């Protein structure tokens, strides 16, 4: 039981440190944005998150109904 616990710590601690390298060891110290709207390349292509696309579709639908 103790061997399994120590082995899991030996595996988990380096994994957490490597995943959080940018946060723990650089001056920027924040996680990268994972949301679609925070990605400049996707914004240039006109790709938005689902919520934004839904909002735009609803706006277009109400404009079509009014016209």
Image (tube, grey):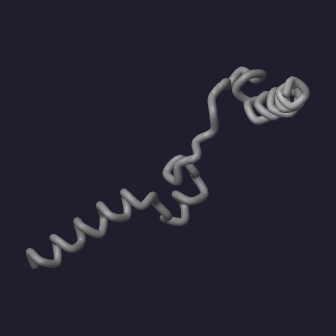
Q: Position of residue 51 (x, y in %)?
A: 37, 57
Quarter that holds the C terminus: bottom left
Camera-side residue of 17 and 34: 17
Give the x, y percent position of residue 65.
12, 77
51 in relation to 24, above or below: below
Near-viewer residue (67 or 23) = 23
Residue displayed at 60% across by 57% down: 41
Relative horizontal placement of residue 7, taking residue 12 as reference (left or right) = right
Question: Which residue of the protein is positioned furthest toward the left in this rendering?
Answer: 66
Horizontal and vertical percent position of residue 55? 29, 61
Q: Is residue 48 left or right of residue 14?
A: left
Which of these two is toward me, 50 or 59? 50
What residue appears at the point 67 percent right and 24 percent down from the top-left corner?
A: 29
Q: Is residue 20 above or below residue 38?
A: above
For residue 45, which quarter of the picture? bottom right
On the rendered structure, is 15 left or right of 45?
right
In this view, the residue farthest toward the front is 1
Residue at position x 16%, y 72% in the image: 63
Give residue 62's quadrant in the image: bottom left
14 in relation to 50, above or below: above
The residue at the point 85 percent across, 28 percent down is: 1
Q: How many marks?
A: 0
């Amino acid at each position: 039981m103790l061997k399994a616990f120590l082995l899991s710590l030996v595996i988990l601690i380096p994994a957490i440190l490597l995943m959080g390298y940018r946060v723990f060891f650089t001056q920027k110290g924040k996680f990268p944005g994972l949301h679609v709207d925070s990605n400049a390349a996707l914004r240039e292509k006109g790709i938005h998150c689902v919520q934004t696309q839904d909002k735009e579709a609803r706006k277009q639908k109400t404009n079509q109904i009014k016209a």
